[in-house]
Image (spheres, helix red, strand yellow):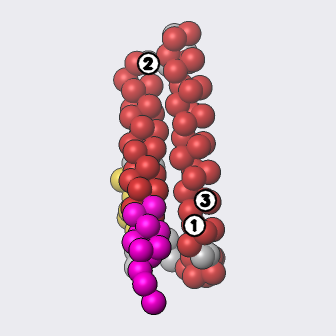
């Protein structure tokens, strides 16, 4: 598969042995921890960007893009949590 990029975003994974091997070894808990850390980092970045916009070091448009990205990732994480909790409740209601 060829690598496809738009701007600085990579749409398809670049070929290489490190990427597929690490994904195969990661369990659900590891991926979830990584996702939570990523969302947390984006929230901290958004906080820093707000300070830069207020100080005039960064434009409003760039700041809003970063804040929007952090907001979207947090909302997505909340939906994943809600689905996981729903699945847990469903499992707990099952009778064996």
| Magenta part of the chain | 85-96
Percent of width and height locating residue 91: 44, 76
Q: Which residue is mark 1?
A: 31
Q: Is residue 73 above or below residue 23?
A: above
Q: Is residue 39 left or right of residue 72?
A: right
Q: Residues within 10 Å of mark 3 (few under 14, many from 20)?
A: few
- What residue lies at 57% left-to-right and 82% top-to-bottom? 24
For numbered disc 2, what is the local secondary structure?
loop
Q: Which residue is mark 2?
A: 59
Q: Residues within 10 Å of mark 1 (few under 14, many from 20)?
A: few
Q: Nearer the viewer, mark 3 or mark 2?
A: 3
Residue toward you, 20 or 80: 80
- Residue 80 can be seen in this image: no
Q: Which label belongs to residue 34?
A: 3
Furthest toward the front, the residue is 95
Q: Quadrant of residue 64?
A: top left
Percent of width and height locating residue 21: 61, 81
| C-alpha span from label 2 to label 1 | 34 Å
Furthest toward the top, the residue is 55
Q: Is residue 55 left or right of residue 11?
A: right
Q: Which label belongs to residue 17?
A: none
């Amino acid at each position: 598969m060829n690598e496809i990029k738009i701007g600085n975003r990579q749409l398809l994974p670049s070929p290489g042995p490190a990427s597929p091997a690490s994904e195969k070894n990661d369990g659900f808990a590891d991926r979830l921890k990584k996702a939570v850390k990523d969302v947390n980092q984006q929230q901290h970045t958004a906080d820093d960007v707000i300070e830069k916009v207020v100080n005039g070091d960064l434009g409003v448009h760039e700041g809003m893009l970063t804040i929007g990205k952090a907001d979207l990732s947090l909302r997505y994480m909340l939906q994943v949590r809600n689905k996981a909790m729903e699945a847990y409740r469903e499992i707990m209601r099952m009778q064996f």
